[in-house]
Image: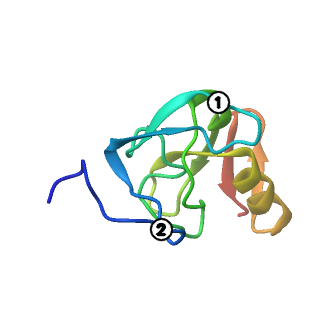
Amino acid sequence: MGWGDCGTDSTGRPIGYSFEATCDHPGCDEEIDRGLSYVCGDMHGEDEYSCERYFCEKHRQNTVLTDQGNYISVCDECKATLLESGDFVEDEEEGIIVRKP
């Protein structure tokens, strides 16, 4: 099995770049697929930084510096969740979200 068909998410939706979809942002009907190019974060599924949804570029414009030193793009809801947790801050000079020192 390759990245074209990665199984299903927790809601039963097929995931992978072979599956056409629309952006998960409410009210957006931009055509995307459910591959890694559109995932919130950097991998299918939910983790500390991101949800398991898929977004067009317009709705995945928030950059997070992970503890592993990777830069990932997350949706607006995940950005808000990270900032509200108190563990992350927005580095306005760099334009990214980072873990609080």
Q: Is residue 37 above or below residue 48?
A: above
The first of marks 1 and 2 along the sequence is 2
Please give the count of numbered marks on the rendered protein: 2
Residue type, label 2: Gly
Q: Which mark is residue 57?
A: none
Give coordinates of residue 52: x percent, y percent.
54, 60
Task: Name the quadrant containing residue 76.
Answer: top right
Picture residue at 32% right of the left edge, 42% below the top: 17
- Scheme of colours in the image: rainbow
The C terminus - image quarter: bottom right
Is residue 46 or residue 71 the one in the foreground? 46
Is residue 60 or residue 69 the one in the foreground? 60
Task: Name the quadrant containing residue 33.
Answer: top left
Q: Which mark is residue 29?
A: 1
Q: Is residue 72 left or right of residue 14?
A: right
Give coordinates of residue 80: x percent, y percent.
80, 54
The residue labelled by disc 2 is 12
Label 1: few (<14), some (14–19) or many (≥20) C-alpha neighbours in 10 Å: few
The N terminus - image quarter: bottom left
